[in-house]
Amino acid sequence: MASLCRQIVRGNAFKSVLLSTARRGYADKMMPDPLEHATGMERKELMAMQAGNDDPFNMKVLKKSAGTRDNPTLVPSCFDARIVGCICEEHATAVTWLWLHKDHPRRCECGHWYKLIEKQPSKRNNLVSTVVCNTQ
């Protein structure tokens, strides 16, 4: 019985000390701005977004244009080749992947045409030019 009382008293004593330090800790302080806290590519991405580039890595889905041989959907790239995924039908559950090469329009299995166009890499102070392209 005595050991049980000792455990209860000791547990309550430590609990109140820990709770009081948590309560008076940092309630009046704020978290730092994400831009101040970020480093490396994450920081460069946040800086590009602040500058108005909401898609610094060109990850947004492109809207299909006519997609004919004479008027293909244009896909921008900083490189000579890029992989593209085509959702052939509106309710399709699979993506058809194809490689696009510069100056060679390519037709998907669904009949839609794509063409790779050259795009200038971003400036070094915004994003690393060998990895990311800046939309303009």
Image (cartoon, helix red, strand yellow):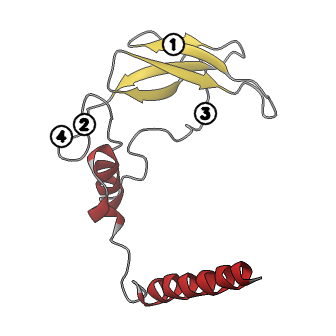
For this rendering, which residue is in front, 35 or 30? 30
The tag earlier along the polypeptide, 2 or 3, is: 3
Give the residue drawn at x 38%, y 45%: 56
Q: Real-space Cα distance between discs 2 and 3? A: 28 Å
Q: Quadrant of residue 51?
A: bottom left
Give the residue drawn at x 24%, y 33%: 129
- The amino acid type of the residue labelled 3 equals Lys
SS of the residue under disc 2: loop
In the rendered structure, find residue 99 and report the number of the disc placed on it. Answer: 1
Q: Quadrant of residue 21?
A: bottom left
Q: Real-space Cα distance between discs 3 and 4? A: 31 Å
- The amino acid type of the residue labelled 2 equals Val
Q: Quadrant of residue 49?
A: bottom left
Circle 3 or circle 4, nearest the eye: 4
Q: Are marks 2 and 3 in contact (CB under 8 Å)?
A: no
The quarter of the rendered structure image containing the N terminus is bottom right
Q: Which residue is mark 2?
A: 128
Circle 2 or circle 3, nearest the eye: 2
Q: Which residue is mark 4?
A: 124
Residue 128 position, x and y percent, is: 24, 36
- Circle 4 packing at 10 Å, graded few (<14), some (14-19), many (20+), is few
Q: Are marks 2 and 4 in contact (CB under 8 Å)?
A: yes
